[in-house]
Image (cartoon, rainbow, N blue to C red):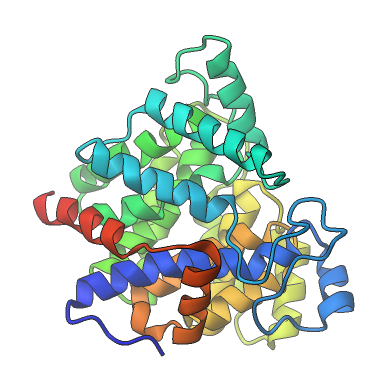
Amino acid sequence: MTPVSANPQLDRALGAFYGLALGDALGMPTQVMSRADVVRVYGALEGFEPARPDNPVSAGMPAGSVTDDTDQAVIVARLIVEGDGHVDPLRFAEELLAWEKEMKAKGSFDLLGPSTKAALDSVARGTDPKEAGKHGTTNGAAMRVTPVGIAFPCDVSRTAAIEAFLDRVVESCQVTHDTTVGIAGAAAVAAAVSTGVAGGTLDEAFDAAITASAAGARRGNWIAGASISARIGWARELVAGLDEATALDRIDALIGTSVASQESVPAAFAVLAMTGGDPWRSALLAANLGGDSDTIGAVAGAIAGSVHGLAALPADAVRTLREVNDLELDPLTSQLLTYRDLD
């Protein structure tokens, strides 16, 4: 296990950020694969694997590589710090476009998701960044929102506190996912992470996610879709008492693993319920789902890491993440926590 930080809150915040990267990297080789193909190719994925050459998204990526989930979360974190606690939508759009340009220059196929791409194309055509995200329904906002949960407290017992927290969530969503569904998914993840960083249990993280997601669904442009809040609660019940293989098959068949927020976000919570929030097992089981496995793993890893801390992540896995991706999240995480202390 990774050594425990002398600061418990910092340990949990680092657990959230590195947990996101862990789930992202474990899910990288199985993304866009069916659950059946994951079983056929890997049997059961047990650790970091390189992407297969026939994977249309991650081909050529070595074992332990992170994807856009981690990269975009780092952008959000940096913009919160540079913006004195706020994310400027135009600056965010510019940063995401610059990131994709860099990825293309590297020959990467791991580029912007459908909602983000459509919104940024709209901004490039002159649309106000505050209007560009009105059709974004996929999980792009949820996958990158962990820094918001690290930086800001979320007291779901007080309506005013929830609404203030949602203001922060919306800032990270608006330019690409300014919809009831996009915000609800991001709110669930951010609230769960924030609760974990504050010292909450997994059950408390679930409850916070359900409450914040329901409130988040009242923000943004209305989009038809199932309630993410309700589906998170249902997901926990759906896998209760099942062995892992049966539970994963049920998540795949009934919850779904696509980029739709209503599928991938509840799927991540279902995985957490299966493992009791163990960061390594949660991220690993998400990888075995296929579909949008890197994002499901990133969400599950972030929440599990926030509850159990960096100390609960395998030290060798964290070392791999740092070395393969030149990833050093400690300074940025410490800066994010300064906003929590002020809020």
- Counting labels gives 0
Residue 78 located left or right of residue 152: right
Q: Quadrant of residue 181?
A: top right
- Residue 20 horizontal/vertical position (percent): 48, 64
Question: Which residue is at 19% across, 43% downward?
Answer: 160
Task: Looking at the picture, tell me which residue is in the foreground, 123 or 266.
Answer: 123
**Is residue 275 visible from the viewing direction of this image?**
yes
Question: Which residue is at 26% across, 36% downward?
Answer: 86
Which residue appears farthest toward the top when viewing the image?
126
Task: Looking at the picture, tell me which residue is in the foreground, 153 or 19.
Answer: 19
Task: Looking at the picture, tell me which residue is in the foreground, 138 or 181.
Answer: 138
Question: Which residue is at 53% across, 28% downward?
Answer: 222
Q: Quadrant of residue 308?
A: bottom left
- Residue 35 horizontal/vertical position (percent): 81, 68
Name the image quarter holding the N terminus. bottom left
- Residue 158 horizontal/vertical position (percent): 20, 51
Task: Please tell me whether residue 113 is drawn above or below residue 236 in the rendered image.
Answer: above
Residue 132 located left or right of residue 193: right
Residue 3 located left or right of residue 210: left
- Residue 236 horizontal/vertical position (percent): 55, 71
